[in-house]
Image: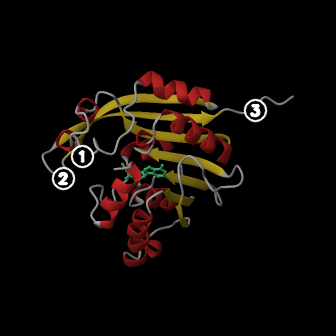
């Protein structure tokens, strides 16, 4: 089964492992980073949109992009039922059905782009395409924040056995530190923060751990002649 099809089924079920709590590292990497009015952010592979909601609550206009139309329906349902928009000082959220390798964003508008376990849904030529698309859509010195699976994750050695990790069957690439940092460098980003962690996951099934890399990089400025 294709990765996108797997997620489409998952979100059609309406359930989400993720609830609405944002990825901790996104908030850490942004620091006290409220948006300057009118700034744009992208939550790529947004799933139920939990991180798009966090970005919008910081004041960003946030494009919530995903290849799975059903994931965006989950987000739209949340926006319409929770009165979230009334409860927060916020920017706006723009749900967008899009492939990570071909973003329908015409110009360089993004101040922040977040990739939460989306790059691992791609394989290597696609990861380079995705990073170069992100670079094209980002302003100079804009921040790219990534949280994704390392090759130490239990799913990496499980040969797609779902028991080892709920993600194992959906993941195309478990990263080595080198493969991820080299891809960033090659596609015009300068790394400013890198760490690895074991993330405890008790949200479903038997509690387990995931091995994650967390990175922040800035879009490299063009040298002015
Ligand atoms: C593991 S989920 C992570 C969801 C969300 N980022 C979060 O942290 O809750 C990966 C998401 O990436 C989306 N996805 C997978 N392949 C994609 C692609 N080629 N282009 C865009 N989105 C994709 C899936 O539909 C899914 O919603």
Residue with the most extreme top position? 178
Q: Which residue is mark 2?
A: 204
Q: Position of residue 128 (x, y in %)?
A: 56, 35
Q: Is residue 197 left or right of residue 59?
A: left
Q: Is residue 128 above or below residue 107?
A: above
Q: Is residue 85 above or below residue 123?
A: below
Q: Give the alpha-carbon distance from disc 3 to disc 1, as whole Å.
A: 41 Å
Give the Cα distance between marks 2 and 1: 9 Å
Numbered-mark total: 3
- Which SS class for mark 3? loop
Between discs 2 and 3, the one toward the N terminus: 2
Residue 222 numbered tag? 3
Residue at image point 46% right, 21% down: 178
Residue with the mark numbered 1 = 166
Residue under the point 26% across and 39% down: 160
Q: Position of residue 170 (x, y in %)?
A: 33, 45
Mark 2 near mark 1, Cβ–Cβ under 8 Å?
yes
């Amino acid at each position: 089964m294709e990765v996108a099809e797997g997620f489409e089924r998952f979100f059609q079920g309406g359930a989400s492992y993720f609830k609405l709590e944002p990825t901790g590292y996104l908030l850490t990497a942004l620091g006290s980073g409220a948006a300057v009015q009118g700034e744009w952010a992208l939550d790529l592979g947004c799933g139920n949109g939990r991180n798009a909601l966090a970005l919008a609550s910081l004041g960003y206009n946030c494009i919530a992009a995903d290849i799975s139309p059903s994931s965006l329906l989950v987000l739209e349902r949340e926006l319409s039922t929770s009165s979230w928009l009334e409860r927060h000082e916020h920017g706006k959220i723009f749900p967008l059905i899009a492939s990570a390798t071909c973003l329908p964003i015409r110009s360089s508008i993004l101040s922040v782009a977040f990739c939460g376990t989306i790059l691992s849904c791609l394989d290597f030529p696609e990861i380079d395409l995705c990073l170069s698309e992100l670079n094209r859509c980002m302003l100079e010195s804009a921040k790219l924040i990534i949280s994704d699976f390392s090759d130490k994750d239990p799913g990496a050695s499980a040969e797609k056995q779902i028991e080892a990790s709920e993600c194992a069957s959906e993941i195309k690439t478990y990263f080595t530190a080198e493969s991820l940092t080299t891809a960033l460098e090659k596609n015009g980003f300068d790394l400013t923060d890198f760490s690895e962690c074991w993330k405890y996951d008790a949200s479903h099934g038997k509690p387990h751990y995931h091995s994650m890399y967390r990175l922040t990089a800035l879009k490299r400025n063009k040298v002015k002649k």
